[in-house]
Image: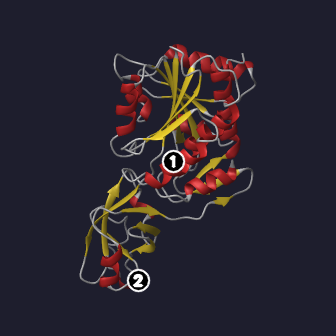
Amino acid sequence: MKKLLFDLCSVGGVSGSETSAAEYCCEYLKKYTKEVRVDYNNNVLAVLGNDKSDKTVLLDAHLDRIGFIVTEINEEGFIKAEKCGGIDTRTLLDACVIVHGNKDLFGVVCCMPPHLSDGREDKAVSADNIWIDLGLPADKVKDNVSPGDSVSLYAEPKELINSRISASALDNRAGVVVLLKLAERIYKENIDRKVCILLSCQEETFATGAKTVPFDLNIDESVTIDVSFASQPGVTDQYSNIKLGKGPMLCVSPILNRDLFDKLRTICAENNIDYQLEVCSCNTGTNGDHIATSKSGVKTALVSIPQKNMHSQAEIVDLKDMESTVNLLVVVICKRR
């Protein structure tokens, strides 16, 4: 699981430009599914179980990652970029990035040295003033980069102590890896239902995958896998009690199906799977909201992997929580109650 997570976090796939990540996942799933394809929006859809069944369960995790889109290249070869998804601009100054042009090029987000600052630059970089330096002359930059190219944050994945991982794009490559490992676990099982695994596009920008793909499927139940907030200094209220390594988070929300939530909670209790509770008073801010309201409505649940430092290049998750999430989904699909 660790190697798969490291590999997938090192692939591009900024929202709207998921091709490289989609191709990677499609190739992986070919070994464990009856059918897998990538559509024109870069959604990956795989089918397991009984594809003739009139009962269908959908498992979704969004494939895209936050990043930038190139909007301009000035006469000196500096690249202007705008946010593509909810980048935390507080972490951007001097951040390393990869510009995905004709070839991948490493760059650095420009930063005013403190010696030359009058104090006005001592804040987060404004979203409309993000410039990237590739260290190349303007003609070389323009030969390789064009407006519209994507840019991803760069951070080499690291293993911390106690089975914890730090990397960029753990939101939501952690959820994607859970579904890839689930396919590996269940592909030889005798499953009576049709199981669709959706690795969906553009969750960070417009939720295009979650809005379109489920509309074309006759889904009876759906579970969305994402990440949510874990406790760290400054985190208050309910999330101050969410710990890494203590199991996935089961969400209660008006937009989600309570019976399906109760089913997941019962499965956890009966199979000694640790879980934590997340309560959302309105919607959840995830693909689950869109899947729940697809067509005439879909019974939907949300399971989240606890994460620290969300939307930064140093996100942190615990492999134990990912393993527990896989174990939970195996029981859900195989009905080992």
Looking at the picture, does residue 194 appear above or below residue 116? Answer: above
Residue at 34% of width from left, 16% of height from top?
A: 296
- Mark 1 sits on what residue? 171
Across and down, in percent, residue 75 comes to: 24, 82
Return the residue nearer the eye: 222 or 325: 222
In the rendered structure, the answer to whether residue 138 lies left or right of residue 60 reads left
Q: Residue at x 52, y 41 (%)?
A: 236
Secondary structure state at the residue bearing disc 2:
loop
User: Which amino acid is tagged 1?
Assistant: Asp
Q: Splitting the image into 4 quarters, where does residue 9 fall?
A: bottom right
Instruction: Please tell me which residue lies in front, 186 or 317.
Output: 186
Q: Is residue 194 above or below residue 236?
A: above
**Disc with the residue nearer the chain's start (1 vs 2):** 2
- Camera-side residue: 267 or 274? 267
Q: Which mark is residue 267?
A: none
As helix, strand or loop, the secondary structure at mark 1 comes to helix
Give the residue type at disc 2.
Answer: Gly
> Where does residue 187 sit, x and y in percent of width and height?
67, 31
Q: Which mark is residue 135?
A: 2
Question: x, y percentage for residue 123?
Answer: 37, 66
- Where residue 278 sits, quadrant-wise, is top right
CA gap between label 1 and label 2 equals 29 Å
Horizontal placement of 88 versus 248: left or right? Answer: left
